[in-house]
Amino acid sequence: MRLISVVFTFLVYICPIFSQSSSSLPNFSSNISADTFAVNMYQRIMNHNHDLVNGREYFPYHNVHHSNPFFKSEINATGTVYSNGKTYPGLHIFYDIYKDEIILSYLNPVGSVKLIILNNHAIDSFQIVINTVPTTFQPFFFPADFKIKSGFYEVSYNGKTKLLIKHKKEVTMKDGYDEYPYSTQKYLYINENYYPITTQSRFQKLFGDKNSLIKKQIRSLHISSFREITDIEIIPILRYYETL
């Protein structure tokens, strides 16, 4: 029964992805062998990016009729992966933020659709596009005893200071099904170290003797609670600090 569920989940994910591009695929005619057609399709979809496909196979593990562990709950996304100095654009990828894994869907040379978990250590960065909105992620590797966990972080701002956002989903049980509630944690890189952004007072202290100036900037936002501050509101504060 579990095998049937996994296969069904697999088909639900893959069929919409390739049906969208079916109009651009070559027509299959009697004078083209099935093997040749499969290889040609593979090369068109993968853009000859054979060397990127070097990870483990991914098997969906959640119920398709309930919440899922993916970034913005989206499985039909496109994006670009930067790996070992090379650029791989126009890929069908999705991001499992519960397991912190990048999943690539591709058609192998024999015409079989596979889901592959890309090797985190081989990825320089990646950009995923959902509803025309791009989000850029970069892997960060910290010591095992460090206060911040290694993994992929959205790079929301990248200047003398950096603003990182960790997108997270935990697993809970509701009505007999796994649910994946979503949350984020922001981190500030300043003075050659990374700090979680929690309370306003702790945030201000990170700016040293510019504390009072940063406090005025925050007040100008007229937000009711610092917990509600967004990365869009934090970025101008960081740019202002870098001019001081």
Image: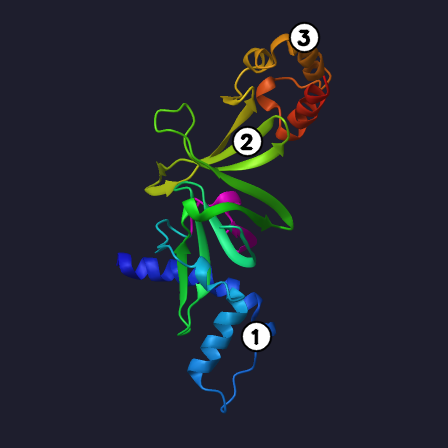
- Of the pair 20 and 152, the residue shown nearer to us: 152
Q: Position of residue 244 (x, y in %)?
A: 72, 16
Is-magenta flag for residue 81? Answer: yes
Residue at the spot of label 2: 164
Residue at the spot of label 1: 25
Three-letter code, disc 2: Leu
Residue situated furthest front in the rendering: 85
Residue situated furthest bottom in the rendering: 31
- Of the pair 37 and 84, the residue shown nearer to us: 84
Picture residue at 67% right of the left edge, 26% below the top: 233
Quarter of the rendering containing residue 169: top left
Q: Residues within 10 Å of mark 3 (few under 14, many from 20)?
A: few
The local secondary structure at tag 1 comes to: loop
Is-magenta flag for residue 29? Answer: no
Magenta span covers which residues? Answer: 65-82
Q: Position of residue 182 (x, y in %)?
A: 47, 35
